[in-house]
Amino acid sequence: MEFTLNKPRIQLDRDAWVHGAMDVLAEEGIAGLRVEVLAKRLSVTKGSFYWHFEDRRDLLLAVLHVWKEGRIRDIVKQTRAQPGKELEQIYHVIDVYSAGRNRRGMMIELAVRDWARRDAETAAIVAEVDDSRLRCARELFLACGVPFDEASSRCMLLYAYVFGISLMVFDSFDSDVARVKRDIADLIARSRSIGADISSSSSASQQTGQH
Amino acid sequence: MEFTLNKPRIQLDRDAWVHGAMDVLAEEGIAGLRVEVLAKRLSVTKGSFYWHFEDRRDLLLAVLHVWKEGRIRDIVKQTRAQPGKELEQIYHVIDVYSAGRNRRGMMIELAVRDWARRDAETAAIVAEVDDSRLRCARELFLACGVPFDEASSRCMLLYAYVFGISLMVFDSFDSDVARVKRDIADLIARSRSIGADISSSSSASQQTGQH
DNA sequence: ATGGGTGCGTACGGTAGCGTATGGTCCCTT
DNA sequence: AAGGGACCATACGCTACCGTACGCACCCAT
């Protein structure tokens, strides 16, 4: 029963298909995610596919749910800061998403969002992810002493920035991309907002060195 | 005995096709921009199409160039401010792009940028547009007295924000979207930047989960 | 008027992709 | 050992596209 696996006979399950699908999604986008292409990639035929999935959309929705759960799990992890280190954690979140690293994750992110523009069901999933992320990020800002409304605005700016910057091509604009990204992170995380009161700005406390 | 079919006999030229193509592009995205679909929309057959265009890609590149010229012409217009009113002009640029109005324009923008992620030729066009916009916007910041490097960073943030916000779904996060957008515009245009620096500190090296 | 160029319709061959039908082959159970 | 179910291959029909070939009608100049 337990021994003998000299015969590789690797069977595919739903998760294997979904995982492969996310690879294709990252590389080719949602329009390039075709069942026969995916099957060839997994070295099987679509006869296998239609055993595990109702149809193509069934796969897409499965991908979407796996993506959603992963993103929500990830954001709570990323925003779990040691007390007193929330500001650094904000910088970390910005850095993780805006830098070129985690390229695969960002490609999937953009593919999903482009899909969501024309699919209501997908848009609803994206809404859930956005909501989770924004609330988690807001907690960080709140912990830094930023007022509630301002915290909401700043984290909205944060996420809009990280997605938007991935859509831009700015090779020739500024030679020092690293400095630009540092500046922007500062603007999002620590700039003094104009609306804030001059005298008793609570956001002033966040500027005092955390170490 | 002439069966007079004195139809207006409207002939289509290349521009008419390109214009129709941009409508489809806005609604269906680049994957939905098919020649037979477009032909039906224009009430002709693809026999006409292949008279005016070499192939499908010929049309796509024509669309791209029309888009590029339009965007560059538009940005110099949008950033031509009366001396002393540059700050207002910055707010105007943010408002024009980030608000729900000009929906068609933003849909095309996002479709083109999604396309550019996998097509080098398209990416080069987007790069030109981005460069033009960033330089124009930087002039506005410079005119406001913002130092050069900071001006570069702020207008990069500006455009990343307007594109990114269009990809998000945040109905349930904050009830007062108008205030959030005002806040963000203030952060981009007028917040006081911080000189000091802790951004490059330590930064826990957690990675985002994949999937 | 007439012949040629312009703009378009029609028909065709070819590919890619979806989903179904059907049957084969392991493996597990009894 | 026999049967049944899990998993997959193969073959098929269908649709949506792409691009080409060719023909027809209209328009304009000679």
Image: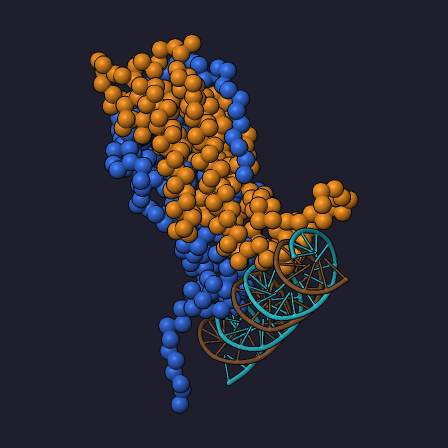
Chain colours: A orange, B blue, C cyan, D brown
Image vertical order of residue B190 relative to residue B182, above or below: above
Residue A64 on image: x %, y %: 48, 46
Residue under the image location 55 percent in, 30 percent down: A101
Looking at the picture, tell me which residue is in the foreground, A172 or A108.
A108
Looking at the picture, tell me which residue is in the foreground, C24 or A86.
C24
Using residue A5 as the reference point, say whether residue A77 is left or right of it: left
Outermost bottom residue? B1
Can the viewer see residue B134 in this picture?
A: no
Image vertical order of residue A91 relative to residue A97, above or below: above
Quadrant assignment, res A1: top right
Residue A98 on image: x %, y %: 48, 30
Quarter the C terminus of chain A occupies: top left
Image vertical order of residue B102 relative to residue A132, above or below: below
Residue under the image location 66 percent in, 49 percent down: A11
Residue under the image location 57 percent in, 45 percent down: A15
Quadrant assignment, res A86: top left
Using residue D22 as the reference point, say whether residue A147 is left or right of it: left
